[in-house]
Image (cartoon, rainbow, N blue to C red):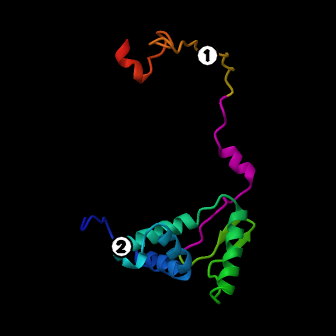
Amino acid sequence: MVGGRVHEPPYEGVLGLLDWAKELWPYVNGKALMSGVRLLELDSVDMLDIVHYFFEEDNTYSTPEGVESRSKLRTLLYGKLYNKEYKFPYTSSETGYNYSTDIGEPELAPHGNSSDIEDALPKPDKGPTKPFVPTTDSNSDSPLPFGKLVDPPAENWGRW
């Protein structure tokens, strides 16, 4: 372990991340600036770590609509504002949602139909319903407001 680093990242992965960052530089640099970081002032290893973090964060979606919306917005912005083609547009397929990049095609929806997924999920326990337990009576004027059933509040520890 030299300089606190375990190993160097693979060459192709580094080039892919840097290509992604270069293509989306207004977004990547703006996000870094909003976080108080000037990417170009960092050493290359720290900059690459931040770009990697931004890449993973940027490629995490909740819904297919979120992927499509971001892609349409960026396609429009990069075309109109920067006069260049957005390199990573959204595409859909029958097996799930993905978009194309030079460093891979992350899957955003599992293959197969939803019943396969539901069959694989754990099922809730169908045991007997537990009986209702009423709340514990309390007396806020007492040093032991819940009697001897529950420890006193921390502010009362010295009084009992």
- Residue furthest front in the image: 141
Question: Where does the magenta region start and end?
Answer: 104-125
- Please name the residue shown 44% across and 13% down the image: 143
Q: Residues within 10 Å of mark 2 (few under 14, many from 20)?
A: few
* Mark 1: secondary structure: loop
- Quadrant that contains the C terminus: top left
Q: Nearer the viewer, residue 38 or 115?
A: 38
Characterize the magenta stretch by its predominant secondary structure: loop
Q: Quadrant of residue 39?
A: bottom left
Q: On screen, 8 above or below 62?
A: below
The x, y position of residue 121, in whole percent, is: 65, 43
The alpha-carbon separation of the residues under discs 2 and 1 comes to 56 Å
The x, y position of residue 94, in whole percent, is: 75, 66
Whether residue 35 is visible here, answered yes or no, is yes
- Please name the residue shown 63% across and 15% down the image: 133
- Quadrant that contains the N terminus: bottom left
Q: Which residue is mark 1?
A: 135
Whether residue 9 is visible here, answered yes or no, is no
In the rendered structure, which amino acid carries the disc numbered 2?
Val
Q: On screen, 49 above or below 113?
A: below
In the rendered structure, which amino acid carries the disc numbered 1?
Thr
Q: Nearer the viewer, residue 128 or 65?
A: 65
- Residue furthest left in the image: 2
Answer with left or right where residue 11 lies relative to residue 102: left
The x, y position of residue 60, in whole percent, is: 59, 62
| Mark 2 or 1, closer to the camera | 1
- Please name the residue shown 69% across and 27% down the image: 126
* Count of marks placed on residues: 2
Q: Which residue is mark 2?
A: 45
